Each structure stands twice: as C-alpha cells, then as structure tokens.
C-alpha cells in the first residue's frame, strides 16, 4: 500500500536529513503507530506519502505507483484517496460541522442525493448526529476532531494519515478518537498515526514504528510505546518479513487502477458499494481527474498546492469550488435546506 525504498529527505543542503535511508512498507489494512521525539521525521514521512514533499533520494510507492512518476494533474486524485487528520483539526472555521464534511464531497462533484445520505451517515458514525449545525468554535476539541475525521473519511480513502490527532486532547477524549480511527481501520482503510500518546499505543497493541533522527530504530508488531528490550528490530533487517515484503503485494497491483484508470463515475460507485472494503479495493470511489478538474478552473499548478496549506487560502479555494458545484447540474442542492432536513 505504502512503500519507502531507501528514502532520504534533506530539506536544506548540509543539514541532517529529516528522514534517512528509510526502507519500510505499510501493507493494506494495517494500523501503524509512528512514534518518536519531535523532529524525528514522522510528519516528513507522511508528507511524502501525500507527495507534498519529494524525497531527496529513493522512491516512495503508494498502491504500487512510484509517486515521482505521477504527473501533477493526477496528484489531487491521489490525495483524494488519502484522508489526512491533524493535531489542530484544520476545519473550515466559517462552515458548520455538516458543511465541513459536505465539502469533501462537493468538491468532487458528488450528486446531491449521495451527499444527503453520506453526510448524516458520517455525522452519526462520529457521534455528532445532533451537532451538524455547529460551527467549529461551538464544538469541543474532541468534537472538532471527530468532524475532521468524518471529513477525512467520507470519501472512503484507502489510506488515512493522522498526524498527532490526539495531541491537543485530554486522555478520555483521545480514547474516543482512537476508537474511531480503529473503526475506520476495521472497515478496511490503512491507518498511519504519528503520536506521542503513550496510553493509546499501549492500549491498542498494533504495529509500532519508532523513529530517531530520521531513522527507524524499532518496528514491532503489536508493540508498546516504549522499547520492551534493547532495540528489538531494525527495519530492513527483519527476521520475519511478513510485513516487509520485497515484492509489491498483489493488492497494490490491482489498486493501480484507482488513479490511473479510465474515467468512471465515482458517485455511482459509491451508491452501489456501501463499505468499499472489497478484496482489493477495486471498487473504491476514487475520482479520476479529467474534464472536471479543467472545468473547475484550477490548472495543475493550483491543484498541486500542498494539502496542508494555510486554511484561509484553502477556504477561498473551497468557497469557489463549492459555488461551482452548487451551480453544476448534478449538485443543485441548497446546502442549508439539506441541513434543515437533517433535524
Ligand atoms: P516530526 O514530525 O517527527 O516532529 P518532522 O518531519 O516535522 O518531524 O521534522 C524532521 C526534521 O526536519 C526536523 O529537524 C525539522 O526541523 C526538519 N524540517 C521539517 N520540515 C521542514 C521544512 N519545511 N524545512 C526545513 N526543515 C524541516
Ligand atoms: Mg510532526
């Protein structure tokens, strides 16, 4: 699903690499904790998966595809298949919970009928069915993070990257967020979560990858937050290769169609398959960029902007795209009315 092949990232010449000689693979359906001190390279690793940061050396593969070979116009489609959640939530401040989630669907031209079904479904999944009308500042931190997770998951991405998602939350609230991520993982999405949340890691007992100074110093199945014994396993030199196959896993090959295939209707697919947890994700509702992107008036350069950009700028782009969607044939819905009907 995600593979780093001898990847080094140096942001500035002469500096110590943020990530160094990284050889690691996250297979489909895994839940992986990335632990390590601040500055150890966790965020850099995630940003390379999103193609926000390019490796200085080595190759990053997502679903069997070498990211350096993906043209910029296909990057938005790649990113649509990767949900992202941050420590500081990054919701659109002037939009309600409902609208924040709706937005992720609206920008890809999802038909109104589907939006009206999916948004309430997501609100319910994250336990906020009665709070769709609240603005982010009217929600607690935990609730805001639930909205952010709903937004990241509503398109049923193959991969969910969570960068310290519980970093701003109290322990009890953090537990709820973690349970939600675990549920998403159980539904078939690969989850990679960077964290300092010792309790979370120890409670879940999933794969733990520990980084120090840009290198993986521990890679443990069902690990704890801390090394149990002297450094147990060094990535790339594993006695058990079950999670670190040299070859691409078969499912990666099959997934190539996701954002390299012929255009098809994502909305129709979404309608017909509820869980998108098919054997190889061949039914995933990944939008293939085509005329739509051109129509939006956002050329490759604009579309190639980093996902984690300033929220204000994102908001402007979002507003424009939302307007376009509202005016389009498929999506003639009145957002406010949808919300009324929610109640
Ligand atoms: P973590 O997420 O584990 O805290 P990061 O990936 O953010 O680690 O950072 C790893 C190293 O790369 C740190 O030394 C950090 O200062 C450096 N770094 C991260 N982003 C940039 C950037 N955009 N420009 C220069 N250096 C960076
Ligand atoms: Mg970080």
Image (cartoon, helix red, strand yellow):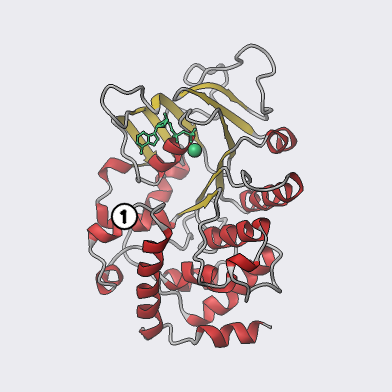
Q: Can residue 185 be spotted in the picture?
A: yes
Q: Say above or below: 47 vs 123.
A: above
x and y percentages locating residue 58 in the rendered image = 31, 29
Task: Describe the element under mark 1 as helix, strand or loop.
Answer: loop
Q: Is mark 1 within 8 Å of ligand 1?
A: no
Residue situated in front as seen by the camera: 25 or 173: 173
x and y percentages locating residue 95 in the rendered image = 52, 72
Q: How many marks?
A: 1
Q: Say above or below: 186 vs 39.
A: below
Residue situated in front as seen by the camera: 324 or 68: 324
Residue situated in front as seen by the camera: 210 or 213: 213
Q: In the displayed image of the protein, which residue is found farthest to the top?
A: 230
Q: Quadrant of ligand 1?
A: top left
Residue situated in front as seen by the camera: 307 or 313: 313
Q: Can residue 248 be spotted in the picture?
A: no
Q: In the displayed image of the protein, which residue is found farthest to the front?
A: 137
The residue depicted at 38 percent of the width and 80 percent of the height is: 323
Which residue is label 1 attached to?
Answer: 305
x and y percentages locating residue 26 in the rendered image = 51, 36
x and y percentages locating residue 49 in the rendered image = 41, 42
- How many other residues sit within 10 Å of disc 1, few (<14), some (14-19) or many (≥20)? some
Determine which quarter of the picture holds residue 293. Answer: bottom left
The residue depicted at 60 percent of the width and 14 percent of the height is: 231
Q: Is residue 290 left or right of residue 215?
A: left
The quarter in which the C terminus is drawn is: bottom right
Q: Say above or below: 192 vs 229.
A: below
The residue depicted at 56 percent of the width and 50 percent of the height is: 189
Determine which quarter of the picture holds residue 233. Answer: top right
Q: Is residue 341 left or right of residue 8?
A: right
């Amino acid at each position: 699903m995600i593979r780093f092949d001898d990847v080094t990232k140096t942001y500035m010449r002469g500096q110590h690499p943020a990530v160094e000689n990284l050889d690691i693979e996250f297979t489909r359906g895994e839940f992986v904790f990335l632990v390590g001190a601040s500055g150890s390279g966790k965020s850099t690793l995630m940003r390379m998966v999103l193609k926000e940061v390019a490796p200085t050396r080595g190759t990053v593969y997502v679903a069997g595809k070498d990211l350096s070979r993906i043209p910029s116009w296909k990057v938005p489609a790649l990113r649509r298949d990767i949900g992202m959640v941050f420590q500081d939530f990054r919701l659109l401040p002037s939009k309600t919970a409902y609208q924040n989630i709706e937005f992720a669907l609206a920008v890809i031209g999802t038909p109104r009928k589907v939006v009206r079904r999916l948004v309430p479904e997501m609100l319910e999944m994250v336990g906020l069915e009665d709070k769709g009308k609240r603005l982010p500042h009217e929600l607690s931190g935990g609730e805001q993070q639930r909205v952010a997770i709903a937004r990241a998951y509503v398109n049923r991405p193959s991969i969910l990257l969570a960068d310290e998602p519980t970093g701003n939350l109290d322990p009890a609230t953090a537990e709820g967020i973690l349970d939600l991520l675990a549920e998403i993982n159980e539904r078939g999405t690969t989850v990679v979560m960077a964290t300092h949340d010792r309790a979370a890691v120890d409670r879940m007992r999933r794969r733990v990858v520990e980084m120090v100074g840009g290198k993986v110093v521990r890679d443990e199945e069902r690990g704890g937050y801390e090394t149990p014994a002297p450094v147990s396993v060094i990535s790339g030199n594993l006695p058990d290769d079950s999670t670190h196959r040299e070859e691409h896993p078969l499912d990666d090959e099959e997934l190539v169609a996701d954002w390299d295939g012929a255009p098809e209707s994502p909305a129709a697919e979404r309608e017909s398959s509820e869980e998108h947890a098919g054997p190889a994700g061949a039914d995933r509702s990944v939008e293939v960029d085509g005329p739509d992107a051109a129509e939006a008036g956002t050329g490759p350069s604009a579309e190639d902007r980093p996902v984690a950009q300033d929220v204000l700028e994102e908001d402007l782009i979002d507003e424009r795209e939302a307007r376009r969607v509202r005016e389009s044939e498929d999506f003639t819905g009145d957002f406010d009315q949808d919300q009324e009907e929610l109640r």
